[in-house]
Image (cartoon, rainbow, N blue to C red):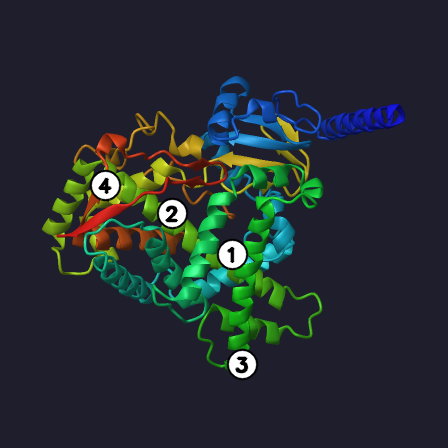
Amino acid sequence: MELLGITTLALVVTVICLSLLSVWTKMRTGGRLPPGPAPLPLIGNLLQLNLKDIPASLSKLAEEYGPVYTLYFGSWPTVVLHGYEVVKEALLNQGDDFLGRGPLPIIDDTSKGHGLIFSNGERWKLLRRFSLMTLRNFGMGKRSLEERVQEEARCLVEELKKTEAQPFDPTFILACAPCNVICSILFNERFQYKDQTFLTLMDLLNKNFRDVSSIWCQMYNLWPKFMKYIPGKHKEFSKRLDDVKNFILEKVKEHQESLDLANPRDYVDCFLSKVEEEKHNQKSEFDLENLAVCGSNLFTAGTETTSTTLRFGLLLIMKYPEVQDRVHEELDRVIGRHQPPSMTDKVKLPYTDAVVHEIQRYITLLPSSLPHAVVRDTKFRHYVIPKGTAIFPLLSSILLDHKEFPNPEKFDPGHFLDKNGCFKKTDYFVPFSLGKRSCAGESLARMELFLFFTAILQKFSLKPLVELRDLDIKPVVTGLINVPPPYKLCLVPR
């Protein structure tokens, strides 16, 4: 027993020494990294962070170390960018240097560098260029896609009418609408809202969007080689990622059986055509693995970001009935209660437009964006950031900027209105991030949010089940993603 104790102690000491050596080596070879708090072995700077609200912790550290500082997540350095000027300087002015995707092991270990969102280098450039071109060809940003969104908005309203003003949880219904829009682009298909396969998929996406910021997934991101062998909820997260990917592959198989190269029907057909075109190119990035992961990326991002914003938005509008009343008044005055809202109405609905923007600003859905990485040794301000270093551009520091948005912790559509009541644009509106790694579906998301919100508020009044003072609007999870608390409401036809 005594020998066992000595052996265990020796192992612990060895691990600590190796961890210290690892950190010291990275600091020595790291050029001139920005200053930051001193890291501890194995855990880095975790003790300086509130794991229930990491973005707030990052902002607090910026007060001490400035707008550019280094933080260690485990033994790996991450450079945090705080505030509009420094994020703009990195992602726009030096965008080609900050073009990499930073590590997110809980997802990387499933996607393995494939797909649209978590790939790097030439693969990312080719797949993003192809995806943007294909999405545009199938209507993104065009009238044809607006008509699809309007039709889905009509279906959404019809489904909401079936609640008959009774209490219900809006989570799945609000996810079905944007999911059907992205399905029409990917597969040329839409699902009925009660379809069991559809509901199962919504459940997978919703759970993963919630759990990506959980303590289990955060632990996996810190110590992936160790956590691979430990049971826990991170295993369920990875399985759900695989389930979504397998759903995409089933759709791909269906498309392969009916593919007409001369008449592509959707994104999958276009990708399969590219696979056929480059079948003799052994280095081609157009293969079934990249198609499956690209499809999963578009399917997940195109569904959950919009549906979570919708869900959070209805909660906020319900919390502030004076905002709801002003939106109702403007909609009634400008388009009435029977004409379907369109994007041409946007300029005539400045207050409603301001409300949609304020929802996105206030909830800061992805507070630190997805992690970036520098693709080469990069001189940035007075520092030298070594190739591969992860970068956190803290979007919450811009969306909650006190100078640009007075009282940023308050939900106030006036943040986007000038003194004459006209809509006011601002460079600080960055929910889709900045630069070449910004959201590929931004124009689609903007269209969906405006048309779905206006369609719902045109037809319904939102009624809470509790007193307004008891209506909680704080995120139930704050980490990589801000997730709204669960709630029920009544939609009373107007």
N-terminal-most mark, 1 or 4 = 1
Q: Is residue 456 above or below residue 11?
A: below
Residue tagged 1: 297
Per the model, the C-alpha gap separating discs 1 and 2 is 16 Å
Q: What quarter of the picture does the N terminus occupy?
A: top right
Mark 1, mark 4: which one is toward the viewer? 4
State the image quarter where residue 488 is shown: top left
Q: Is residue 159 or residue 277 the one in the foreground?
A: 159
Per the model, the C-alpha gap separating discs 2 and 3 is 35 Å
Proximity of marks 4 and 3: CB atoms separated by less than 8 Å: no
| In the image: residue 467, left or right of residue 304 | left
Q: Residues within 10 Å of mark 4 (few under 14, many from 20)?
A: few
| In the image: residue 84, left or right of residue 144 | right
Helix, strand or loop at mark 3: helix
Residue tagged 2: 308
Q: Amino acid at mark 2?
A: Thr
Residue 441 horizontal/vertical position (percent): 43, 54
Mark 1, mark 2: which one is toward the viewer? 2
Residue 277 horizontal/vertical position (percent): 60, 75
**Residue 257's disc number:** 3
Residue 230 horizontal/vertical position (percent): 67, 43
Q: Is residue 371 above or below residue 246?
A: above
Mark 2, mark 4: which one is toward the viewer? 4
Per the model, the C-alpha gap separating discs 4 and 3 is 50 Å
Q: Amino acid at mark 3?
A: Glu
Residue 75 horizontal/vertical position (percent): 69, 31
Is residue 99 among the parts visible in the rendering? Answer: no
Q: Residues within 10 Å of mark 3 (few under 14, many from 20)?
A: few
Residue tagged 4: 465
